[in-house]
Structures are given as structure tokens and as C-alpha cells.
Amino acid sequence: MEGTAVAVCEILKYLIIHWKCETAGVSKGTLLEGQLVISIEALNSKHQTNTLHCVTTIASAGSIYGGLVLEKFLKEIQSTLPGFSAKLPWTSEEASSSQDISGVTPFQMTFEVHEKPRILMTNSLMIKDFLHKIVMVHPKIRFNFNVRVNGILSTELFGAKNEPTLNLSNGMALVVNYQHYVSRAKSGTTEFFCSRIHPVLGPPVVLFIPDDVAGVDLLGELILTPAAALCPCPKVFSNQLNRISSVSIFLYGPSGLPLISPSREQPPTTVLKDTFCFIDWKKYHLCVVPNLDLNLDRDLVLPDVSYRVECSKEDQSQNMDPQGQTLLLFFFVDFHSGFQVQQMELWGVHTLLTTHLSTILMESHSVVQDSIEAAVDQALEQHHQAVKAHQKLQTSLSVAVNSIMSIVTGSTSSSFRKSCFQALQAADTQEFGTKLHKSFHEIMQYRFLHHGSCEVKQQLLPEKNDAEQSTEDAHENSSLEFLAGRAVAAGGLQSVRVAESRPWALSRALSLRVHADPPAPRAVSSSIKLLRAPRVCVSVRGGAGQVREPAPPDDVTRTSGRRGPTGGGITSLVRAASPGAMAALGGDGLRLLSVSRPERQPESAALGGPGPGLCCWVSVFSCLSLACSYVGSLYVWKSELPRDHPAVIKRRFTSVLVVSSLSPLCVLLWRELTGIQPGTSLLTLMGFRLEGIFPAALLPLLLTMILFLGPLMQLSMDCPCDLTDGLKVVLAPRSWARCLTDMRWLRNQVIAPLTEELVFRACMLPMLAPCTGLGPAVFTCPLFFGVAHFHHIFEQLRFRQSSVGSIFLSAAFQFSYTAVFGAYTAFLFIRTGHLIGPVLCHSFCNYMGFPAVCAALEHPQRRPLLAGYALGVGLFLLLLQPLTDPKLYGSLPLCVLLERAGDSEAPLCS
Amino acid sequence: MAFAPVGPEASFFAAVDQHRASLLAALRGGGAERAGGGPRPASSSQVLASIENVIRDIITSLARNEAPAITIDDRSSWENMKFEDSVGLQMVSHCTTRKIKSDSPKSVKNFALILKILSMIYKLVQSNTYTTKRDIYYTDSQLFGNQTVVDSIVTDVSCMLKVPRRSLHILSTSKGLIAGNLRYIEEDGTKVYCSCTTAVAVSSNIQGIWNLITDAKFLLIVEKDATFQRLLDDNFCSRMSPCVIVTGKGVPDLNTRLLVKKLWDVFHVPIFTLVDADPHGIEIMCIYKYGSMSMSFEAHNLTVPAIRWLGLLPSDIKRLNIPKDALIPLTKRDQMKLDSILKRPYVTCQPFWRREMEIMADSKMKAEIQALTFLSSDYLSRVYLPNKLKFGGWI
């Protein structure tokens, strides 16, 4: 590698490492997403003949390089490219042309170099290979690689955004489309039902860095994760007896960067040249020799190391397809540290790996070998299973054919035989046999493979596919032109089409999608998600140096990119969508449009944006859908069993837990839709906070116990054992174990209180409070709760446990009881700002049940008992205010929310 | 029968006789509608023709470039069962079917095996020879894998061709035993004398039995071989003489069921069952009485709805004060089985059975017949069964 290629690769490495470090601080494990443009412009040099003057520009847009200090970058990059700094004038531009697009500075840098045409050609192939390799693990990064030689432009796009991937840890994903690894099969394309490879990961191993490696002072460890896969998918290939014809090894360093060392004496792959170093190929009956015949000039990802598998002697006797399967091996070396990994440190690790990988791998030889072989074992296991399935098919086939043949030939009924022969148009038994076998084979084979294929439906919008197609075409055309070195005038035009077709296609996809979906909030949000993906179109320098205007739909992306997930996104979406789409959204869409324009009223309070009417509408709708989905989740299971049956309880646990864990999303959605800024995090708003948690857990429970003083006395009077024995029983671990295994206990005491309070209090109150105010919210919230308990009726009606009248009477009673109780816990929630208090109270009340007043009236010790009842209620009323004093529990998030909304001091907040 | 054992005095059988009379009356009232219905023993040519039809269908669908499939009535779902008090479980006429496709990796083997067994049956029927299921399995044990595969395919084929298994020329060795007052002649002319002292294996060709003679007042079906032997050892048979005792050694095989059916059809003697008071025992009794789901297509030849439950009733456990130590708690599997039996259609017309099962479900306890030995070693044969028979303790 020389000149331009080295420089471009190193710069890109630096940029990606920087980028990775920036995003790692925000969210670990997300894929990098964005676009980089690399353009090389070469003109015949005026000073030297047969030399091209190349200007290389690397540019990005959007907020990718927010934290990059250009001076520092230049200094550091120059130190890594010593050969260059002398020769090259480094220039950087602060790209003033795109300043107006957004507040962030796009990055752009340029350097110039003189190259021979042939070397430029190799260089661009190397760069392309490098880009392709990066794209394989960072599928969401898009590279736009332009080379213009004397005015002839060829463009290539790299990106695997919509291709199926296997998620690796640490923000990488491996693209599993087989086309990147082997060339399209020349024969029998119909047999390719599965277009994927199925990589299996070996166990990660820690690599030790040997002492003699100089300059190592790392605060973390290197971890190697091997992955192995057969390509193409073994199921596809199973009809041709499988043979592995080659082995390809790909090396990736930290941040998913290829470990290519340019022009160094010791390439990182030396150790792998020795074929038996890490894999005992004899174990797999493979005879492996290094393959040095690597062609850069292909459409595939170029392996770092490649082996050819020689045919063993017994194999040669069979007629083998020369093009067998390829065993792909990926080595991902990653750097883990207890601390936030610094950029320079990562850069250092990279340099270390590119120079000393062989030594490091040898140091941990045995563990590396184990891990790699584990992965290979698994991958080959798939292969063997496919072979086995194929054999099974063959056996079944021959059994079926032989049986039919034996019946047909043994039949004494000539008419039967004649009709059979006629059906297959066979003259005699022998022909019948062969035809039978053939047609059976064909049909079974075809269907069998089709059924057995591992293709998963690609979840793409069809419109987007369209766009992808057009880029694909362009990609092929342009690369062909470039490689052939032909001067095609249309090349320039081609790139324009690429630049424009995507955004347009995207907006079309969006408008269609809005059109198709019902105007539910969810549909809108998913469209927003689509929009949020950065789709930054960087200005591509034209031949005359003019700056291309961004395509019109970029307007959309720009707005949403800046405003992020607020109402502004919706506005721009609706604005961008065609009028038809707006009509499809109907009244709701229009209303959304009218309210969600924060730009118009920027100074209004957090709640000021959306009108109170809409806010209430959204809130009530959210609450209702929450309540419905909570109750609905109980009934998704079709069952004949009563509700106390353990199987029913278990199933309902799952569904209720799913719904309640999803319910915060509803609040999130509500916040997005109404644009309310609560001022605190959602979790705090929902009562998950630490401040004052102990009083919040104890005092409300105490208060509830005081209210239940009478029933508690009654319980202790009726208890057959005395207090000490009772306590012993209660505290014994066995009784707890019994409780925990009793499904009904778990439901009444743990799951039901937790989920109901979470859904009906923690999620609903923050939504209702801004709409109705705190006081009314206390009384409206339990309505949802009460209605939700109506579902017991259906159950009782279904099982006819008692007469219809009494069922309804008890339901009405239950409704009022739960409504009162709901109001009480809502009150507790608002006053304490904690979820734990209501949950404990709920659990306690579930345990006590409704006070058995009738039993108390007929109790032998009636007087003290009734006194206890009265005392309990009296004390409760007396202590209700002081024990729930908000001062005990720190600042109340709901009150903060309302204060921000400009409400005058709510009575419940003090 | 020179030394016919002396049974109890005539009045002992009053209740049994009365029961028999009522059964006969019900039979007469119900008319002779049972004569028809159900697959009749098919002639060889019919069997051959239906196999040829299956093959022809496969070949035509192959010729049309479609993947051939074999259609079999789905006997695994209660949706396809109808219950008739006089017959037992039957398949509904338009039941859902199950397709065994040749083009799905899961069923291709099954498809091939069905064809293989069809071809074997074809040969057997043509040559008028008989074989056993075990024999079929051993012809290619590697291909079939295990015996149950063969068993289920033979049942499937029998259902698909609507032909009783015997007409497929496939036999099964019978495991049932019979003892008591019975004489008959097998198809090949062998005279069989059953007696109260030695048990005789149930013939493997029930259809060929003729000239059956018995004076038995009742027929007792015993679930377990151990209990059967115990009853013989205790001289129960001779003391209750004349009677017949049969055991199917657990879940009854086809021949035992055919025999019980034949005895009922010929003699119309009351038939009682003595099973464990556990869900499994109830299940076995239901198979005798109403048939099983997997053989429901042949219910007409197999079920005897006149069978009554004599013991061990769950309510007896409490009534006889059987000590708690002799009882076994119901396992989870038992509970599930009990629940599933309670949901079956025939339980609705057996309120007494239902109540007994509810008693078992409530007490969460089951008892084996042997639990009675806790009371005294020969309580079962000396006290329990005689009293039950004398006072009509069946339901």
C-alpha cells in the first residue's frame, strides 16, 4: 500500500475511532450511523508527464465530528503518517458552504499528492477494499467514494444499511449476506433459497500481551472473539455433496476496523500463513494450503488470509463441483477497559495490533486455538446436519419409490397398472420406475429445500427496496466503468442520479407509509423514527468545482435532524408528506400539525405548546389504552380454566408483566406527542427514585395498618395460635417458601400490586395530572382502575358461579371499593412521589381483603372490636395529612411538573 | 363340567340378575340399530382396491407436478369425536384431516413409511398370509426406528382405508388373560376350556372364535395382572362361580377389547370393572366402555357401553376407612389426566362417575386396589367384591 491509500485508510481509522469514542459516551453498543465522502480528484500534472496530481478530500456532515479539534487531529494524524508530513501540504477547510444546513460543523479535509496512474488505480482498489471491510461490521456507515480522473467521474457507494446482520457486542454487526463473501454462483441460481451465512461465535478469550512487545502500557485487556460460518448456507448446498473448497480469514481490530498494516515489514497475518497454527485441520479431514492468489479486483470483501483446500485422494474419485463452500473465519479483537476508553489509547491498541498481532496471538496460542476450533466445530456441525437431512430425504425418497413400485408391479389388476402408467406416460415398468423416481425427486427436492430454507423475511419497506435497487445498479455500472478504465461521459450523470434518487425515494416511502397506516400515534412515531436516521447529503464537488444544491427533500431530514424527537419532527413529516397523506391522517393528523409547532411559540412554558384540549385528549386516550391493554393482556390466553388455576395465573403473569414493562413506553409516547417537558426523568416521574424512600415505604403502610386496626384485631382474635407462635410461623423460611411457590399468593401479594400500581398509578397519574390537575386526577385515575376490575364479571358469568343479579351487585360493589382504594393509593402516590408506598399498601389490602364487618358485628367480643374499627378510622383520618406530608419525601416530581406548567400551587403539594 | 365349582346360593346373584334384566330391556328398547354401522370386515379385494386408490392418487398428483400427500383423519383432537351413549366415542363423519406431505422435512419420512407399510399390507393380502406388528418392525428395524412408529402407522392406515386391522392381515400378540366359566372353539378347531384355576391367553383371532359357551352370571374385568392372579389364588372365581374374569394387563390391546365385546354381544352378561382408584385406572375403564380416541374409527367393534364401574371407587376409600398410609397423593400428571377426563364428553352422562372423580380431585389422593389389603389380606376377594356384587355396588 502506498501513498494515498495509506493516508486515506489511516485518516478513516482515526475518524472512526474518534467517532466511536464520542458515541460510546452517549450510548454503548449502538451502531455507528452516518455518511462519509471520500473524493479523489486527479488531473494530469503540468510539471511531470505521466503523473497525476491528486487532490483527496475526506468529508463528513452532520454531528459526527462534533468534538473533533482540527488542529489536534492534524497534528496527530501527521505523526502517524511520517512519510507524508514532509511531502504534503495539509489543508483543512471549515466547509463554510454547508454552514447553513445546521448548527454543527461538518468536517472536511483535503490533501494533495502526485501519483502515477497505475498506482492510483491500485490505491483506489485498496481503499475500496478497506471501505468494504468496514461496512461489513458497521453496516450503517455509508461511504461515498468518488474518483475523478481527468474529468471522468466514477462513484461507488458502500453501505449495508438494510442488509441482514448478526449483532456483535460493542456496537458492531456482521453483515450476513452471502454475496459479500462469495461470487454469485454461476450455475443453478434457483437453488439459492437462503442468501445468508450463519456465523457462530466462539467463546471470547483474553489475549495476553507478551513482555517483549515494546511500548505497551494498557489499562485493559484484549479479547478475541472468533466467528465461523460456511458460505453459502449449508442448507442451500446440501443437494450437491458438500465440500469445503477454501477458507477465508478476516481480521478486525477494536471498533471494527480492519487490521491492515500498510507497508510495514511484519504484517499482522504472518502467523496465520502457517496453516496449522491455530486449527488442526486434520481433525476436520481437510488438507489446507495457503492461497496466495488473491485478486483485489473483485466485488467481494477481500480476506486478510485465504487458504485453499486440496482435494484428498478419495474425494477426487467422485465427481466434485470445483466450487465448493467457503469456510469464513472472522477474528474480532476488541479492547476492553474498566474505564472509558480514550481515543489515543484505542489508537495505540490499533497500532500495536497491526504490528504485533502475530506475537500476541502466539502468546495465547492454546486458548485461541480452543476458541477458534469451538466456532469451527459448530459451523461444521451445521454442515453435517444439512448433509444428514439430505441423506434422510434420499432414504425416504427411495423407500417411497420402492414401495409404490412394488405395489404397482405386484398388482393383479391390469386396469390399475394401466392407469398408473398412463399418468406418468410410461410404456413399461422400467420406464415407469425411472419416471416415478425422477418426478418424485424433483418435487420433493424443490419443496423440501424451500421448506428447509432459513431465509427470514426481510423487514424492509418495499419503497426503500426500490431506492436500494437504483443505487445498486449505479454501483455496478460505475464500478465497471472505473475498472475498465473507459471514458464514459455518462459517468458524471450517473453519480447525480445516485445522489438524488435516495432522498426522493425515501420521502416517497414515507408518504406511502403514512398513507397506509391508520392514524394511530404509533404509526406516526414509527415514521418519525425513520426520519430520524441521519441521511445527510454532503455536497459533492462537481467537475467545475461548483457546489451542488441539496435535493429538495433534504429539507425534511434537516429539520428532523435538528429538532430531534420532539413535535417538530411530526410537523416536518406532515409538511413533507403529500397532501394525500395528510388527508389520510385525517383530523388527528391535522390537529397534530396545528399544535406541534414549537418554533412558533418558543417562549411558551413547557406545557404551553399543545393546547390543553389536545393534551387531555391524548392523555385520556393513553390511559384508556393502557387500562384496556392491561385487562386485555389477561384475556389473550384462551382457556377454559378458572382464574385461580396455576396455569392460568402463570400465563397471565407473563402477559401482565409484558404489558406493565411496556407501559412506560406509553408515557414516553405521550410525552413525545404532547411535548410536555416534565423537568425530571420519566422514571422519577413514575415514582422510581431514592430520595426519601424509607419513609415512603413505611409510613403509608403504617397509615393503612392503622385504618385496618379493627380487621387486624379481629384477625388476631380469630387466630388459633398465640402471638409468639404466630410470629414463629410467619418468620419461618418454610412458610415463605410455601408462599412463594403458591401462585395465588404471588399474584395477590406481589405481581398484582406491582403491575397495577405501575400501570394505573405510576403511568397514568403523570399523564392525567397536567390535564385535570392533581385533585381531580386522584378521583379520575381510579375510574380506570375500577373499570379494569369489571372483567371479573365475565369470568364469573362464564363459569356461572352465582346468579346474574348477585354477580352484578358484587361487581358494582367491587367497582366502588376499588375506586375508593384507587383514589387512596393515587393520593399516596402524589403525596409521597414514590411507587413503593402504594405497592406495599396494595399488597397489604389484598392480603386483608374487604373488612368483614358483618362478622365483626356478630363476633363474641363485639365491643372492643367495634371500638377498634372506630379507633382505626378515626386515627386514620387524623394522621392522613401529617403522615403523608410531602416534606418527608423530598421534592415531588408531579408537583414540579405542575409548577412548570404554571399552575398555581396545588393543594396536594403542601 | 363334572366338577363345576359350587358357587354361592342363588339369591346372591339377585342384584346382578336384576341388572342384567335391565340391560337387556334397554337393549331391546334401543332396537337392533347396532347391527349396522362401522366398518365391516372387508374382503381382500376391497382392501387391495383401496390401497390401489391411494397409490393412484399419489401418482396422479405427481403427474400434475404437485407434491403428493396422504390424507388421514385427525384422531388426536376431541373436536373430531362425537359421543353416543349407546356406542361410545366415534369419529364425526366430516372430521378434520391431517395431511402427511411428502415435501416437508418433518413428514417426509412418515410419508415414506406409510407407503412402505401399504406395500407390505398389499403383499400380505394378496398372498393371504398374516403377520404381526412386531414382525413388520423387524423387517427393517433401522428404518422404522422403534415399534411405536409401526404401531401408529398401522392404526393410521387402518383408519385411512376404513378397514379393521385384521383385514389388513396384521395381527398383534395379545397380552390379555381370561379365566372362569367359558368354553369356545378357535378358528382352526382347537377347543379351549377356561377354568377358574388356570388363566388362558386371549386368542389372537377373536373373529374366528365360535361356539362360545358359558353359564357366567357376570364378567369381571380386572385392570392389573397382579390383582387378577391374586383373585385366582384366593379362589374368588370358584366361590363366585359361575363367572368369567378377564384382564388386559393395563391398557387393553385390541384382542382383549374384541373379546370383551364378543362376550357381551353373544351372552349379554353384566360386565364390571375392577380398577385402581386413580386417573389411570379410570382411563382404562373408559377405554373398555367407550373406546379410545385413537381407535375411535372402529368403535362399533370395540366398545361395550354396558360396562359398569364396580371398584375401587374413590368414595369407598372414605366409606371403608382405608388408612391414610395406604393412599398415595395425586401427582401433577395425575391431576392433569383427571382434569382432561372430566372434560371428556362421556363424563356428562355419567353423573355418578363424575362425582367419584370429583371426590378424588378434592381429596387429592388415589388408591390402588391393593390398598384393601391394609384392612385384611383377603378383604378384596372375601368381603369387598362379594358385597359389591350382592348389593349392587356398581355405578
Image (tube, rainbow, N blue to C red):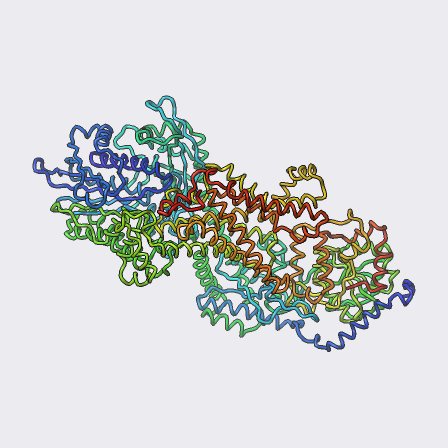
Q: Position of residue A138 (x, y in %)?
A: 33, 42
| A646, above or below B255, in the image | above
Q: Nearer the viewer, residue A346 or A204?
A: A346
Question: A670 and A155: which one is in front?
Answer: A670
- Quadrant of the rendering where the N terminus of chain A is positioned: top left
Above/below status of B6 relative to A152:
below
Locate the C terminus of chain A by quadrant: top left
Q: Where residue A403 sits in the image (x, y, percent)?
A: 55, 62
Left or right of A752: which side holds A271? left
Asked if residue A907 shows in the view, the reply is yes
Could you tell whether A766 is left or right of A701 in the image? Answer: left
Q: How many marks?
A: 0
- Where residue B155 sits: x, y (%)? 62, 63
Q: Nearer the viewer, residue A795 or A366?
A: A795
In this view of the protein, which residue sits in the foreground, B304 or A508? A508
Q: Seen in the image, is A184 located left or right of residue A793?
A: left
Left or right: where does residue A594 sit relative to residue A231? left
Question: Which corner quadrant of the image does residue B240 belong to?
Answer: bottom right
Q: Can residue A666 be seen at all in this image of the molecule? A: no
Q: Residue furthest left?
A: A46
Q: Position of residue B349 (x, y in %)?
A: 70, 67
